[in-house]
Image (cartoon, rainbow, N blue to C red):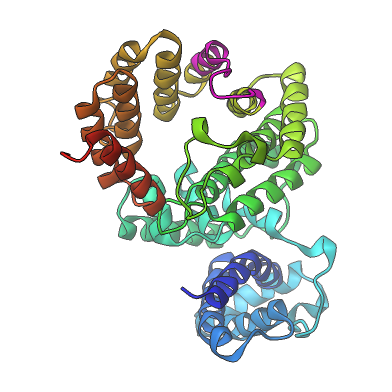
Amino acid sequence: MTAPDRTVEDLLRELAPQVLGVLARRFGDFATAEDAVQEALLAAATQWPAEGLPDHPRGWLVQVAYRRMVELVRAEAARRDREDRAARRQPDDWRVAPAVDARPAADRDDTLVLLFLCCHPTLSTASAIALTLRAVGGLRTAEIARAFLVPEATMAQRISRAKQRIRDSGLPFRLPDPGEREQRLATVLHVLYLVFTEGHTASLGSELRRVDLSEEAIRLTRAMRALLPDDSEIAGLLALMLLTDARAAARTGPSGELISLADQDRGRWDASAIAEGVALVTRAMARGPVGPYQLQAAVAALHDEAPSAEATDWPQILALYGVLERLSGNPVVALNRAVATAMVHGPTVGLDALSALDADPRLAGHHRLHAARAHLHELAGDAPRAVTHYRAAADRTTSQPEQHYLRMRAARLAGPAG
């Protein structure tokens, strides 16, 4: 992919939820609007690299998507009923496409509305997350399927059914009332966390990070905090994102190679993001109640505030993971706790803790489990077993930077004979 193509791809991902918001608000039909926007994005991805960017890319996308939306609506048997319902909900100018050169108003960014709409109460949590990752996060179906550990065809069906349920619900395109908002909040925060995670470490491809996704997740979480400033878990999630993203510049070397946390140049970490994240999580935990995002942020703060890897407060991190594991029951948390156990009590104890995770179908065979086991075998001085698990982890991850890093560690331990 060339640099211009990458610029177009980034721009389209940024504009997609804005354009979808315009169409969903005007027509009141999320599912058909999403189809129309996808076709407009495809047209732009084909034309813009060859013909150059239009003067007003957002307006161009709105015009193309709007025309396609009209075609799709007319093709539906219930077109007139849907238009009548939309007309009762919308102002008189809803049928008029925005001018190509129209500037988006600051209060017309509908991404937050989209976020809550995708977390509709009639959807399962898994379907809500999948739909939001597609419509708001801009992830491809294959990437979402990878995150859920299901086949791409299965995920495509799940997303299609989710859009149909939203269409059938007839809900207006607006932020939910406070009561509804509270019901959807946990799913919304989980979605934002997954979008950020995918941006921080891309599950597919040659790039370690997808900065557009991590930045969008942080932006939306800031907007959520502005909407609900007293919610301690929103503050905890924002703190977690900031404290994690603060290390981003030091995670790769000159050639884009992955650098482990212990080997990073801490002078390259973003001190202002760390200060903001620490202040957020400190206030949130003092106010309570303490939830999983605050606990994860507290762990990240301990890493960020340590002057060196050796000075990391592992006993406190282990204690936090113990509380977090009881709250969440998440196997990845259990894996991280096992690593922290090894840092406090030695690698043999940590390996015993990892053995208990082999029976968990959510994690068994996952590259993270093999990578953790390889790291602990390396700490224990068992190079042959470390090499075996580093190679197994490399075979199972779809991230090329992670593959390169894991194979490099295996090769270094194996030596010339390996």
> Which corner quadrant of the image does residue 102 belong to?
bottom right
> In the picture shown, does residue 270 fall above or below 338?
below
Pick whichever, 110 or 160, lies toward us. Answer: 110
> Which corner quadrant of the image does residue 212 belong to?
bottom right
> In the picture shown, does residue 107 fall above or below 398?
below
What residue lies at 79% left-to-right and 64% top-to-bottom?
108
Left or right of 256, for residue 146: left
> In the picture shown, does residue 44 fall above or below 184?
below
Where in the figure is residue 244, as x and y percent of width and height? 60, 37
Where in the figure is residue 271, as x and y percent of width and height? 73, 36
Residue 362 at least partly seen: no
Stretch in magenta: 305-322
Where in the figure is residue 55, as x and y percent of width and height? 74, 85
Q: Any magenta on residue 304?
A: no
Kindly give the residue lying farthest to the left in the view shown.
417
What residue lies at 57% left-to-right and 19% top-to-bottom?
312
> In the picture shown, does residue 374 fall above or below 272?
above
Which quadrant would the C terminus be assigned to in this image? top left
Pick whichever, 274 or 71, lies toward us. Answer: 274
What residue lies at 44% left-to-right and 25% top-to-bottom?
336
Residue 3 at least partly seen: yes
Kindly give the residue lying farthest to the front in the view shown.
416
Where in the figure is residue 21, as x and y percent of width and height? 68, 66
What residue lies at 67% left-to-right and 47% top-to-bottom?
218
Kindly give the residue lying farthest to the top in the view shown.
345
Pick whichever, 198 or 95, lies toward us. Answer: 198
